[in-house]
Amino acid sequence: MSDSRISLEAIKGRGAASHVPHRFESLARDAFDDGWGGLVDSDVQPPPHTEVILEDAKSVISRNSSPDIHFEQSINPYRGCEHGCVYCYARPTHSYLGLSPGLDFETKIIAKRNVVQVLQRELAARSYVPRPLAVGVNTDCYQPVERDLQLTRGVLQTLHDTRHGLALITKSSLVERDMDLLVPLAQQGLAAVYITVTTLDAKLARILEPRAAAPYRRLETIRRLAQAGIPVGVSVAPQIPFINDDMEQVLQAAWDAGARRAFYVVMRLPHELNEIFQAWLQLHYPDRADRVMARIRDMHGIRDDARRLG
């Protein structure tokens, strides 16, 4: 895969700045200036647009038995996420599709168009044992494309109709659209919502999570959900050493807005995310990049790309 270079001015609104080759790629190309000129003119590409790729999924409920993850089954209507959060641990999953965990992850969104039909079939199976279903834990279930496709809406409608327990996590205010489904479930003790607020610093949020809702808007979403009677919590994940250092302020603001639960995880850099995040650090925080990485190594051991939770 060619790692097409993007000019620094062109990465506005995107978390990654290049098509980082995925780990299964056997060939990789780097741009090289041979002294004849033309490198900048020929290799700099315009800002990439978002492409939605429709997929027919064979199954949609994922299961895990990890002691570090506090749910047994989950569902994700989308693969890839246009929010473009540079720290997203799900980026390396695009490698399984033969796509880059860099720009492809946030510009090539895979939508499971039959997610509702497959979910209904799996819930109806005689072998199915009902357990709370975590919605959108890998990639955001309310990313921009959801406004048109409404796949998450369909999933919630199915869970509402079957009185199935769920918890979902998002950075988007679009979750307010579905309060008509979430409120009845919450009244039966079957629903909870977590809103991710990584920082209250709007400037940092714009480069860390370039296409997600602003921090103040997420706090307003917490307020509206809480006022509607939906149990709401805040995710202050990930915690990045020396970058987002306002956890206490975030927790206080979330409490004031109505959140009564909270959790966090420390930054991890599995697989290709290590290269993507370090490139982001060198671009935005070159003065402290070495310090940040030294602390991450200290917390996770000698390796940068810690792949184990905990």
Image: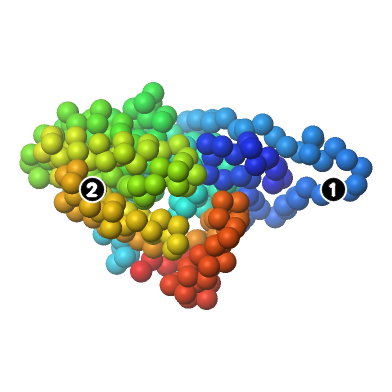
Residue drawn at x 32%, y 57% as measured from the top left: 247
Label whose residue precedes the other's in the sequence (1 or 2) = 1
Question: In the rendered image, is residue 97 in sight?
Answer: no
Against 174, residue 122 (above or below) is below
> What amino acid is at disc 2?
Ala
Residue type at mark 1: give it: Asp
Please name whichever residue, 155 or 31, is drawn nearer the observer in this view of the structure.
31
Single out the residue that lies furthest toward the left.
Answer: 188
Is 240 rendered above or below residue 80? below
Secondary element at tag 1: loop
In the visual, does 151 lie left or right of 179?
right
Kind of element beneath mark 2: helix
Q: Residue at x 57, y 45 (%)?
A: 16
Residue 3 place in picture, x, y as percent: 69, 46
Q: For this view, does 77 lie left or right of residue 303? A: left
Which residue is depicted at the point 22% across and 44% down?
193
Question: Which image quadrant: the C terminus?
Answer: bottom left
Whether the residues at callouts 1 and 2 have beta carbons within 8 Å, the answer is no
In the drawing, what numbered circle is on residue 33? 1
Pick the front one: 219 or 261: 219
Vertical relation: 216 (above or below) 243? above
Residue 41 point in image, percent of width and height = 79, 34
| Residue appearing at x 55%, y 55% in the figure | 285
Tell me how the rendering is colored.
rainbow
Q: 10 Å neighbourhood of mark 2: few (<14), some, or many (≥20)?
A: many
Looking at the picture, how far across and down is residue 18, in whole percent?
Answer: 63, 45
Label 1 vs label 2, nearer the camera = 2
Residue carrying label 2? 254
